[in-house]
Image (tube, rainbow, N blue to C red):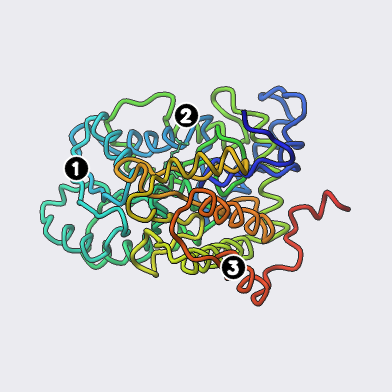
Amino acid sequence: MIQHTGRHFLQIPGPTNVPDRVLRAMDYPTMDHRGPEFQVLGQEVLEGLKAVFKTEAPVIIYPASGTGAWEAALVNTLSPGDRVLMFETGHFASLWQSLAERLGLTVEFVPGDWRSGVDPQAVEARLAEDREKAIKAVCCVHNETSTGVTSRIGEVRAAMNRANHPALLMVDTISSLASIDYRHDEWGVDVTVAGSQKGLMLPPGLSFNAVSEKALAASQSAKLPRSYWHWDEMLGPNAKGFFPYTPATNLLYGLREALIMLVEEEGLENVLARHDRHAKATRQAVEAWGLEVLCRNPSEYSSSLTAVVMPDGQDADAYRKVVLERFDMSLGAGLGKLAGKIFRIGHLGAFNDLMLGGTLVGVEMGLIACGIPHKSGGVQAAMTYLAAEPGQAVSGHERRQAS
Ligand SMILES: *Cc1c(COP(=O)(O)O)cnc(C)c1O
């Protein structure tokens, strides 16, 4: 039995901590989803989401986990046997690959070392070779949550442009949206896939497709079967704020509140800067402990999580078990081939300096408790950095509540 005396620290890289304000915003009677009050809510969230994706394009909301939005992106735009280019950045990229294969797509999976992002030069080289334009889509995971590596999507787009290739660009932003800089329109992304339970600070249960005009045009001739996921079925009623089937009404109450907090109050750019700062403080701690960050390339460091390599011969899962049982904190496990070899510190969503401080204290106490070889002073290094580099004076998250 884990004793909860005070708050549990949910420091996995999603689902993330849900602010009290968002929980309270959902604690209302469910309304008629075909009535006038719902219409106002529907219009507000459908419109409000665009700022987070940095798009003018429609954003579709599904009552589904992120995996559903992956499927929706593929079945709306592609036909059986179509060739898609994917990159083995880690566990989530591998899951997307399996999903695509189960749907009957032909996946070209570019091998990777699970410590690096998508290589824009590799994208350009492969597309330049494809003279018959057989590749219909390039699919990337923006922030590979299993490794803490963020791919440079703007550079991937530039590489596609240099190759002058018409493939669609699809990007999974499930653990980067509202945490790491992302620009659907500017980067010419055709389908952006996202979920509710990470940077958007909501419980699991919603997922999203932001859809470019080019993707919409592709959907008119795509032949993969689809019904529940059909964009046209959604976009019709969405134009008036409604949904074709019962939406997750109470999650939408929460989404409305989260958008107020992120966009109107704190401001999206401040949200992103806060994540960068907490990630940097975390890396300073890891470095001071003498441990290794899994991500190889500093230009690909993730601002939503940090994956830490366990010293040789130490079991990351045994360590995480001690941290959970002794300090009531959940850290992320190594997934797939990284199982037992790394642990992941989530620092995304509703989060502040003292929550990060508590998180790092828990990590360091766990290292001591388990006798894992390390240098002391990680928490001190993070404190020194955070104290010297002030963030936003008021995060805004609790401002409305306090007033
Ligand atoms: C969490 C996550 C997923 C899986 O989303 P579900 O909501 O569990 O279906 C996919 N991709 C990335 C990058 C993720 O972080």
**Amino acid type shown at disc 2:** Glu
- The structure residue drawn at horizontal position 73% and vertical position 58%, both measured from the top left corner, is 265
Q: Earlier in the sequence, mark 3 or mark 2?
A: 2
Between label 3 and label 1, give the one nearer the viewer.
3
Q: In this figure, which residue is indicated by the disc labeled 2?
A: 233
- The structure residue drawn at horizontal position 76% and vertical position 30%, both measured from the top left corner, is 27
- The structure residue drawn at horizontal position 39% and vertical position 53%, both measured from the top left corner, is 310
**Amino acid type shown at disc 1:** Arg
**95 sits left or right of 354 in the view:** left
Q: Mark number for residue 382?
A: 3
Q: Secondary structure at mark 1?
A: strand
Q: Earlier in the sequence, mark 2 or mark 1?
A: 1
State yes or no: discs 3 and 2 in contact (Cβ < 8 Å). no
| Residue 55, visible in the rendered structure | no
**213 sits left or right of 128 in the view:** right
Which part of the image, by quadrant, shows the N terminus?
Answer: top right
Q: Secondary structure at mark 3?
A: helix
Q: In this figure, which residue is indicated by the disc labeled 1?
A: 83
Relative to the observer, which residue lies in front, 63 or 233?
63
**Amino acid type shown at disc 3:** Ala
Q: Which residue appears farthest toward the right when viewing the image?
A: 403
**307 sits left or right of 23 in the view:** left
- The structure residue drawn at horizontal position 22% and vertical position 30%, both measured from the top left corner, is 104
| Residue 302, visible in the rendered structure | yes
